[in-house]
Image (cartoon, helix red, strand yellow):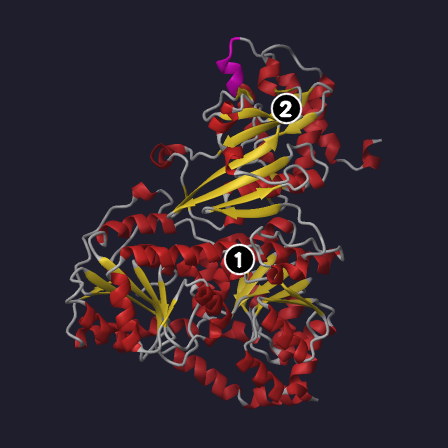
Amino acid sequence: MTVIFYSLMLYVALPFVVLYFLWRSRKDSAYRQRLTERFGFRLSAKSLKPGGIVVHAVSVGEVIAATPLIQQLQQQYPDKAITVTCTTPTGSATIQSRLGTSVQHCYLPLDYPGAVRRFLTLLRPELLVIMETELWPNLLHACAKQAIPVAVVNARLSARSAKGYRRFAAMTKPLLRNINLLLTQDRASSQRFRALGYAGTLQVSGNVKFELDIPATTASMVAHFQPMVAKRLVWVAASTHAGEDEQLLTLYRQLKPQFPSLVLFLVPRHPERFDKVAELVKEAGLSLWRRSSVTVEQSESAESTTTSAEITADIALGDSMGELLVWYQLADLVFIGGSLIERGGHNPLEAICFAKAVQTGPHLFNFKEAYRQLQQQQAVSVVADSHELLDNSRRLLNNADARQAQGQRAQSFFLQQQGATAHTVAAIDTLFSGAAMPAKPTPTNASPESTAHHAEEPAAYQVREQNGASYWFDPDFFTEVMPQHFQSQWWQQQQAVIGSSTGRNTAYFVQYGEHKLVLRHYYRGGLIGKVLHDQFWLQPVAQSRAMQEYQLLSWMRSQGLAVPRPVAARYQRSGLIYRADLLIELIPESKDLAAILQQRAMNASEWHAVGAAIARMHQLGVYHSDLNCRNIMLDASGKVWLIDFDKCERRQPGEWTVQNLARLLRSFNKELGKLAVFHWQPADWDALKHGYQQQLLTPKERT
């Protein structure tokens, strides 16, 4: 009855809902575009593939937070369609810019019964994943009726919100019963959900916002704008609201005499306020530079951009969408808006990721737990009002060492909290497989309270943080991993180096007890590699080159593929870049195909085995980005091994398998034309393809 009453009230409000969108469209025409989508109509025109997983992220912040999770789901379920929904035009633009055509996208319809029914009938999802606490009664009720499991992830529930839910207990309890899995950011939220009557599967998974996805284009944007502010002291005020911009402009005028090079970079929260803020700047008698006045040709190569003129204005207005990470990286000091007024504050994590000194006003209840932990680490400045903000800004702008120390403490805290995405994906997997959930990797310096909820089961790897570096290691191999394990000089001092590779970049073969290992340092390729060599733009640990390869190798071995065993990986941060290393077991008594073919011809059964090994890899959806005759090994028993999975990934089945084989064929022909002796002929390729095709057949078809 409560759901019926709720729906009736929605229908009564329908004219006002339509008027709201039309009113918002006065300043942003996107609010009246795709309006039919919001009522579940014309979705079929988007050619959405049914089934798979729907991930709902309300707006920009949730989309950014969900991006690493979505990418991990794509890796975990390469054969399932991922549909990402939101409710705002800016959220829609962020989905398209960050995820492109790799996902399906539409608006989540408004919570009218008919709109929800049309949406679910068309998509028929196997699972609905809701980011944070975007709970709609009719949507959850319809999912329960259609047996669609619902996972609410990264949920947070403040005491203030819990009090509001208690007022409507008749609606809240039935709503919570329709959630199959609830993953919260912290224990306090978990306890509040239990107090509201949630009786389902509830776990504390941590905050996925600590695993920030940095778009590939960000590096070139930073390289473009860096010279423009190189001589300026940059104070970024992010996600500001009406009532704050006026205060910040007043503070700027008070600070400017003491700091002549100071530029205030205002980034309003909502795009419809861009012009209004520009007017405020002019009324204050200050000079203005607008981001929209500059055209940037984006590229992943930092050196490919052309530098514009220096910014000499008092105020820089960030009137663009999706570029806040750029401004954070250029900042000397960051103020997080929505906090000088009773808005509740905004996410500080994107700024502290880059080791920036962060300030906030007193109204921070939206991110109370994050700010509380940052305060415990002396990693954030919380001020009571604009007067304290002035004093704090003077102190930090005048002391680069203090800014740097605060920022490093904040970044260290940020990195220690990572792991929520892996835990979330593992929990979601239980809804599909019913398997026991693996434990979240535990930093060795974590407190007992923070690890109690996942201490029962061992992790596939353990995590250690030390001196700005993250280490992953196999606890069945290493009891403890040390920095020197990734230093070739240390192995040489131990007289443990037993060989090295002869490729473009050296890899070392080392003896460790009874084991032989390969130590590989990651290097850049191409033109940018000549400049940056082994430096990669900062990424979350789990998305770094070494850890991605570590995870993929571990998963492939669990599926029975013959690939090297990863035993340890290192991710070392330095400013805006990281370096990475990987330790894997050396395949004993093995040679790559190129080396073998320089000595002898291979027989048909060996070629069949090679083809079958590649087919098994493709059947599991693994794309090898550099499949060539030097990355396929034969050991003394004739077993086929596949190696070098840097920049490789899991994919949905497609034409890429044909292209992968074509790349391998080109490598044989290349070696044939380059080497004086190379026992390779077209008939060998036919034998390899025969083994490949036989592996693709069912056992019955083979007989």
- The foreground one among 489 and 643 is 489
Quadrant the N terminus occupies: bottom right
Instruction: Determine the secondary structure under disc 2.
Output: strand
- Badge 2 crowding class, 10 Å Cα cut-off, few under 14, some 14 to 19, many 20 or more, is many
Residue 694, x across and y down, in percent: 75, 30
Comparing labels 1 and 2, the label whose residue is closer to the camera: 1
Residue marked by disc 2:
633
Query: Residue type at mark 1?
Result: Gln
- Describe residue 39's horizontal placement relative to residue 138 as left or right: left
Residue marked by disc 1:
417
- The foreground one among 247 and 278 is 247
- Describe residue 243's horizontal placement relative to residue 481 as left or right: left
N-term mark: 1 or 2: 1
Classify residue 528 by image quadrant.
Answer: top left
**Residue 330 seen in this snapshot:** yes
- Which residue corresponds to the image point at 25% horizontal and 46% vertical from the top-left? 306
Pointer 1 and pointer 2: residues touching (CB < 8 Å)?
A: no
Tell me the distance, in whole angstroms, between the alpha carbons under discs 1 and 2: 39 Å
Which label sits on residue 518? none
- Asked if the stretch drawn in magenta spans residue 14, the answer is no
**Residue 317 seen in this snapshot:** no
Query: Residue type at mark 2?
Result: Met
- Which residue corresponds to the image point at 52% horizontal and 31% vertical from the top-left? 520
Residue 603, x across and y down, in percent: 71, 15
- Badge 1 crowding class, 10 Å Cα cut-off, few under 14, some 14 to 19, many 20 or more, is some
Instruction: Determine the secondary structure under disc 1.
Output: loop
| Residues in magenta, as a range | 670-676
